[in-house]
Image: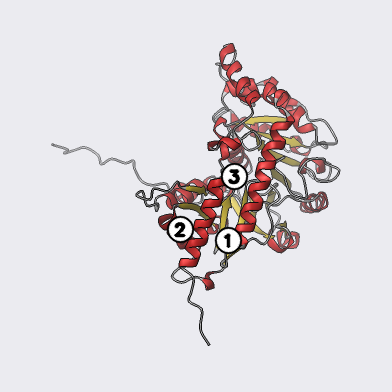
Amino acid sequence: METSGLAEWRFGAANPALEAASRQSIRSLVRRVYDCLDTSDPRPVAPFGHGDPSAFACFRTAAAAAEAVAAAVLSGKHSRYSPAAGVADARSAVAAYLSRELPYELAAGDVVLTAGCNHAIEIMMAVLASPGANVLLPRPGYPTYEARAALCGLEFRHFDLVPEKGWEVDLDGLVAVADERTVAMVIVNPSNPCGSVYSHDHLAKIAETARKLGVLVISDEVYGHCGFGSKPFVFYYIFSPMGVFGETAPVVTLGGISKRWMVPGWRLGWIAASDPKGALRGQQVIQSIISYCGISVDPVTFVQGAIPQIIANTDEAFFENAMNVMREAAEICYQKLNDIDCTTCPHKPEGSMVVMVKLDLSCLDGIDDDVDFCTKVAREESVVICPGSGQGMKDWLRITFAVDRSLLEDGLERVKSFCIRHAKAKEVN
């Protein structure tokens, strides 16, 4: 075909920032492990790589929640576009829900609804990305923060969580990496990926540190109320959401219904400002969040329409049963992993649906690192595990235990068999 005089196509060049960001996502990490599965293996895949319990009957959402969504669809009242910050009644319902554990009341204007908690992360990283600014992120952490920060040109720095102290924040280390351009710190509580729940006293110290630095706290509480150990997340006078300390330092809470109601596919999250002294509004942070929402996607309107009834009508027994199942799964996971010579859980999970596990490669033959371990256990045992290096922890594993009990036990036994098969031969004296 004659192309004389026509310009070459100018599109198609890869975006380096997008490629770098996508490599850091949980989905990308887990997909690469799934690609290693032996499709001829007749055993069911043990999906320990990401936190989506909705596939299992034991974690099915409350009937009241499903009925509320169905009623919202059938009403015909929730098919229109949503306002940028969300439907007013839904914002009010979320504000009242969050206020239950706070020493002051949130208003609807303190809440912005998002298309899931990942969307909330996207918004906050974009809003904070002023020229030269940086944010402090936990290590290990949730890599979507790094991915979203990188994509919008926001510098991020890491502070460590200390496994020997229940994955508490190394506050001295946090202060050491901050400077005059630091604008925010992120905590994830209950923790993904560590399975820890912070005490009231530790959260108070985090707030005091934030105030000394002059930064806001982004508190990722998508696993809020998913606590089942010795430190329940609720009851702010014992263990609290971070917003309790909004008087000390401004807090932006990220949350949603995906984990507590076991409905990640419904994509309904929120950003809530715990800011009784008005620092966030004074600095135009809330307005910037709403402005970003005006050029972004909206959460599904009929799910927003259902939120007041989802919150009001879900029986407490549903949550209690879900946490009982999760507690049992966490116990099974902890005991079985500590029964494997090459794996150690330094801290028994007390919340969320995940746990960090230390690999001892000195016990294994032919395993180079955590990525090699995960790809080979997928190929040989049809078990999918997320490499810890994706959370900044080389030679660790991130394991999700929100799985049907029989598959959880079977999958962990396969991991044990893999480790026995690849164990180094013991020297004979």
- Residue lying farthest to the left in this orientation: 1
Which residue, given by chain and number where applicable, does mark 1 sit on? 393
Quarter holding the N terminus is: top left
Taking the image as shown, residue 128 lies to the left or right of residue 412, namely: right
Q: Amino acid at mark 3?
A: Ala
Q: Are marks 1 and 2 in contact (CB under 8 Å)?
A: no
Above-or-below relation of 187 to 158 = above
Q: Are marks 1 and 3 in contact (CB under 8 Å)?
A: no
Q: Amino acid at mark 2?
A: Val
Coordinates of residue 241 in the picture (x, y in percent): 77, 42
Q: Earlier in the sequence, mark 3 or mark 2?
A: 2
Above-or-below relation of 122 to 86 = below
Which residue, given by chain and number where applicable, does mark 2 sit on? 377
Total marks placed: 3
- For the residue carrying disc 2, how many other residues have a C-alpha within 10 Å: few (<14), some (14-19), or many (20+)? many
The label number, if any, that marks residue 32 in the structure image:
none
